[in-house]
Amino acid sequence: MEKAGFFPLYVNELNNDALETYLVNREKFFPHLRNKYNSNDIKDVISDKNFFNNLFKNLKNDFNRDFKKNSIDLITGGPPCQGFSGMGIRRSYSVEKKQLPSNHLYQDMAFFIHQIRPKIFLFENVEGLIRSRWTKNGEKGEIFNDVLTTFRNIPNYNVKYKLIYAKDYGVPQNRPRVLIVGIRKDFSNNFLDDDAVLAEFLPFPTSDYPDIEEIFSDIIDDNFVYGESTNIYKNDPLNKWQENIRFNPFTKQILKKNDPLTDQQYSRHSLKVIEKFTYMIKNNGEIPEHLKTKKFSQRVLPSKWGNKGPTITACSLPDDFVHYSQPRSLTVREWARLQTFPDWYEFKGKRTTGGIRRAGNPRKSIFDREVPKYTQIGNAVPVKLAFEIGKHFVKILKNYN
C-alpha cells in the first residue's frame, strides 16, 4: 500500500514480534507509528470511550488535517484466520468456531471502520471463510454471511467481495483469499453485481508472476552449510524481478554482489532428511517408501511453474517445501521472496517455533501464539498483491477527487 502511494497513520497488531517487524521497517519514513500511533489489542482500543476523539485530535495536531472533515482514505485489516483455514480447523481441537475469540474480531474491525468513516475499507481472509460454519451442525457458509452482513450494515458504503488468487496479481503462489471491499457511497457507484472485480472495486488481474528459478537463482550459495548462514550476495541480480526485489529505498540503490544479505540461514537437517530431500529433487518429488512420514504435506518447488502457473500457498511452516535444486527447506529470506517482500525488509522475533507455542490450545483456553519470522511472513498479504490493489484504490480516489 505504501509503494502504491498511501501514508500509514496508525497500526494495530496483537503480537509484539509482528508489531516490531512492522515498526522497525518504518522508523525512517514514518516515525510517528512507533512514537504514538500503534496499539496491540483491538479490544482495548474499541472499549476506550475516548480513543477515537483523542485519535482525531492527535492527528489534527500532528498532521494539520481535520480527518473528521477530510476523511482518512483507507482502512485495511486481516483479522486472524486460523479458525477458518484448513490447517487452523485441524488445530482447533474439539472447540466450536463460535467459541474462538479471534473468530469474532471482524466485528471489532467493522466498529473501527464505523467510527473512522474512511473512503475505502478492505477486509482480507482465507478461502475457508466462505464455507465455514459456526458449529458442526450449522449451515455451510453461515460465517461468511455473518461477516458480509456485518460490513454491509455499516451505513453509507457500497460493499462487494471476491475470491481472488494471488498468482493473478504477480505473486508466485496460488494463494486464494477472500477480499471484501467497502467504498463510501460518495466515492462509488452501486454496481449491481457483488463481484468486486467486475464492479471495479478491485483491479483486474495482471498475471505477471515469476518462476521459482527467477526468484531464487541470485541467492543460491553452492557452498552452503546446514545450520549456518550466507551473509552476502553471491551474485548480482540476474533478471528484472531480482533487481526490483533488491532495490533499497533508503540508499536508492540495487543491492549488488558482496553486499550484506540477511535471513539466509539454513536449517540443520538430519542425514535422513537430507537423503529424502535429495531423492525428491532427483525423482520429481517422489518420496521413497522407507523415508515416508506422517507429515501433512511436503513437496519440491518446481523451477518453472508450467501451464497452470503457481500451485502453492506459503503458510507458516518452512519445511512444507523443498528447494528446487538443493536438498533443504527454504530460508526466511526465500520465504519472504515467495511473499514478494523486498530484501531490505527486516523480520523480528524467533526464526521458527513449534507445537503448542505456534498453534495454541483452544480446548484449554490457550489462545496465545508465538509468531516467529516464518509465520509472520506466511500470515501476510503478499506485497505485490497489496501493491496492485493499492494502485487501484489510488485511481478510484483520484477519479472521485
Image: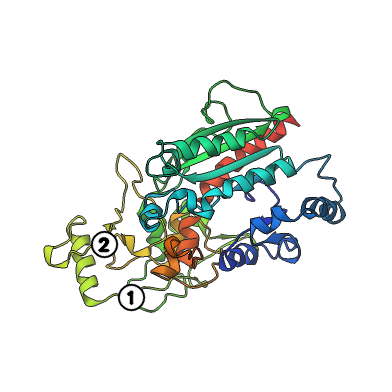
In the rendered structure, which amino acid carries the disc numbered 2? Lys
Residue 237 percent across, percent down from the top left: 46, 60
Residue topped by disc 2: 295
Circle 1 crowding by C-alpha within 10 Å: few under 14, some 14–19, many from 20: few
Farthest residue in the front direction? Answer: 137
Q: Classify residue 212 as left or right of residue 295.
A: right
Labels 1 and 2 touching (C-beta < 8 A):
no
Q: Is residue 221 above or below residue 306?
A: below
Q: Residue at x 40, y 36 (%)?
A: 140
Mark toward the viewer: 1 or 2: 2
Residue 71, labelled with which disc? Answer: none
Say which quarter of the image contains residue 230.
Answer: bottom left
Residue 274 percent across, percent down from the top left: 24, 71
Q: Nearer the viewer, residue 355 or 36?
A: 355
Q: Nearer the viewer, residue 74 or 138?
A: 138
Mark 1 / mark 2, whichever is N-terminal: 1
Residue 369 percent across, percent down from the top left: 49, 65
User: Disc 1 to disc 2, how far (Cα)?
Assistant: 29 Å
Residue topped by disc 1: 223
